[in-house]
Image (spheres, helix red, strand yellow):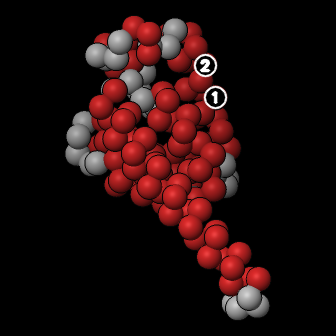
Amino acid sequence: FPTLGAAMRSGVPPARRLDRDELVRRNRSLQAALSGSLAGEGRERGMGLFKVASLAFQRGASDATAYIAAFVHVFGNEAALVHLPELIALCPDAPKQADLGRAFDVFRAERLAERGAAVERSAAGVG
């Protein structure tokens, strides 16, 4: 998650909190993977859009569905399927983490349904 300070102040029970060093390591790894998934000149703009969307979600200015839509807009469906579970795990706010988890479950189910429909069309020789 782009900001780490809230993780240490959050109301998440201690058993759910990550060790600060582990949190920093995983956050940096996620940031590097996300940045690496963006092409050259679009990297800075994409990461900027991601940070704006993350702050809006953290501050309550957008909901989980809008946040995931913004993530997909920047990184694409495949990157979302790969990286959102880690981003959700790193979310320091338990209610927001739960909201993201539910929104991601819907997003993932929709993508799986789309893939299934594409396979069926392909098997039937359609489009």
How would you rate the neighbour count of disc 1 (Cα within 10 Å): few for under 14, some for 14-19, many for 20 or more? few
Q: Do the CB atoms of the residues marked 1 and 2 lie less than 8 Å apart?
A: yes
Horizontal and vertical percent position of residue 121: 68, 84
Q: Is residue 122 above or below residue 57?
A: below
Q: Choose top left, top right, bottom left or bottom right for residue 85.
A: top right
Q: Secondary structure at mark 2?
A: helix
Horizontal and vertical percent position of residue 66: 34, 54
The residue under label 1 is 29
Q: Nearer the viewer, residue 96 or 60?
A: 96
Q: Is residue 43 above or below residue 111?
A: above
The residue under label 2 is 25
Q: Quadrant of the C terminus?
A: bottom right
Residue 26 in view: yes
Q: What residue is at 43 percent from the left and 41 percent from the top?
A: 101
Q: Secondary structure at mark 1?
A: helix
Q: Is residue 41 above or below residue 95?
A: below
Please indicate whether residue 109 sits to the left or right of residue 59 in the image: right
Q: What residue is at 31 percent from the left and 13 percent from the top?
A: 9
Residue 51 in view: no
Mark 1 vs mark 2, CA separation in Å = 6 Å
Residue type for callout 1: Ser
